[in-house]
């Protein structure tokens, strides 16, 4: 379920990790520019459209507050709410009022939600693309804590984050497209809290 919601938890790998791309100086500059974006962003919110591995489309609103905090609030009929409180990523089924907790450190979100982002040091860069329309960087966890790859896509003119794509350890792809972004509004801290009445499952693998 977590992979279908655009988050990837640590999982056994097949022993054939992708190798770093041999980056040209211009490509390194692009990666640095992407890292600079995440270092400058403290607050971000907007709307999203998610296309899952089987083509299912969901939408909703999201809130980001660095370091470490994120909230994806899906619109009905999707019952899920995803919250990162800075330590755990909580996947909450609001219909059942139950949730699973995953360490933030075991998801690709840690690569962009850290207080200080250094992609050239923290990530294995798989692919870099820059043209007149977009800038994209595909990366994976250098320490192999996370199975799968994350691609972040930016508008080439404004360097505004437009999309990210997760391919999980099983090769399943989830695409999230962002719109209506605001980076000058701080979200209510309570948005990054989840309160449940029923038993929760803690997943700390």
Image (tube, rainbow, N blue to C red):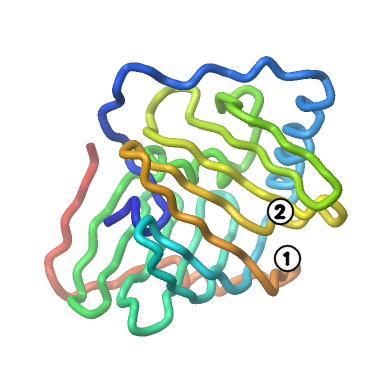
Q: Residue at x 28, y 34 (%)?
A: 11
Please state which of residues 123 and 198 is positioned toward the viewer in this rendering.
123
Please give left or right for residue 145 compared with residue 133 in the image: left
Is residue 138 depicted above or below 166 in this figure?
above
- Kindly indicate the quadrant of the structure image that contains residue 111: top right
- Please provide percent x and percent y for residue 187: 59, 71
Nearest to the observer: residue 122 or residue 79 = 79
Residue pictured at 53% horizontal, 49% vertical: 165
Residue at the outermost bottom position: 76
Residue furthest left as drawn: 199
Q: Position of residue 109 (x, y in %)?
A: 49, 46
Q: How many marks?
A: 2
Question: How far across and down, in percent of the image, does residue 146 sit?
Answer: 39, 33
In the rendered image, which residue does mark 2 sit on?
A: 41
Q: Nearer the viewer, residue 66 or 138?
A: 138
Which of the 4 image quarters holds residue 46?
A: bottom right
Q: Are marks 1 and 2 in contact (CB under 8 Å)?
A: yes
- 109 is higher (above) or lower (below) than 189: above
Residue 30, x across and y down, in percent: 78, 34
Q: Residue at x 70, y 69 (%)?
A: 181
Q: Which residue is mark 1?
A: 183
Q: Residue at x 82, y 50 (%)?
A: 156
| Label 2 secondary element | loop
Mark 2 nearby-residue class (10 Å; few <14, some 14–19, many ≥20): some
Determine whether, in the image, residue 152 is placed left or right of residue 83. right
Label number found at residue 35: none
Q: Quadrant of the N terminus?
A: bottom left
> With respect to residue 99, does 185 lie above or below?
below
Which of the two discs, 1 and 2, labels the residue nearer the N terminus? 2
């Amino acid at each position: 379920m977590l992979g279908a919601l655009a988050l990837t938890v640590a999982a056994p790998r097949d022993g054939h990790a992708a190798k770093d791309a041999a980056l040209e100086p211009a490509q390194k500059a692009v990666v640095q520019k992407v890292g600079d974006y995440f270092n400058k962003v403290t607050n971000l919110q907007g709307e999203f459209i998610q296309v899952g591995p089987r083509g299912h489309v969901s939408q909703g609103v999201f809130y980001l507050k660095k370091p470490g905090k994120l909230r994806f609030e899906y619109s009905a009929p999707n019952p899920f709410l995803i919250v990162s409180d800075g330590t755990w990523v909580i996947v909450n089924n609001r219909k059942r009022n139950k949730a699973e907790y995953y360490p933030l450190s075991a998801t690709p979100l840690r690569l962009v939600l850290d207080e200080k982002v250094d992609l050239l040091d923290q990530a294995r860069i798989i692919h870099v693309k820059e043209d007149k329309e977009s800038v994209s960087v595909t990366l994976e966890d250098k320490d192999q804590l996370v199975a799968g790859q994350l691609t972040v896509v930016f508008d080439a003119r404004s360097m505004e984050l437009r999309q990210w794509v997760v391919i999980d350890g099983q090769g399943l792809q989830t695409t999230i497209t962002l719109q209506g972004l605001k980076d000058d509004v701080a979200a209510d801290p309570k948005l990054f809290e989840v309160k449940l009445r029923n038993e929760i499952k803690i997943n700390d693998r």
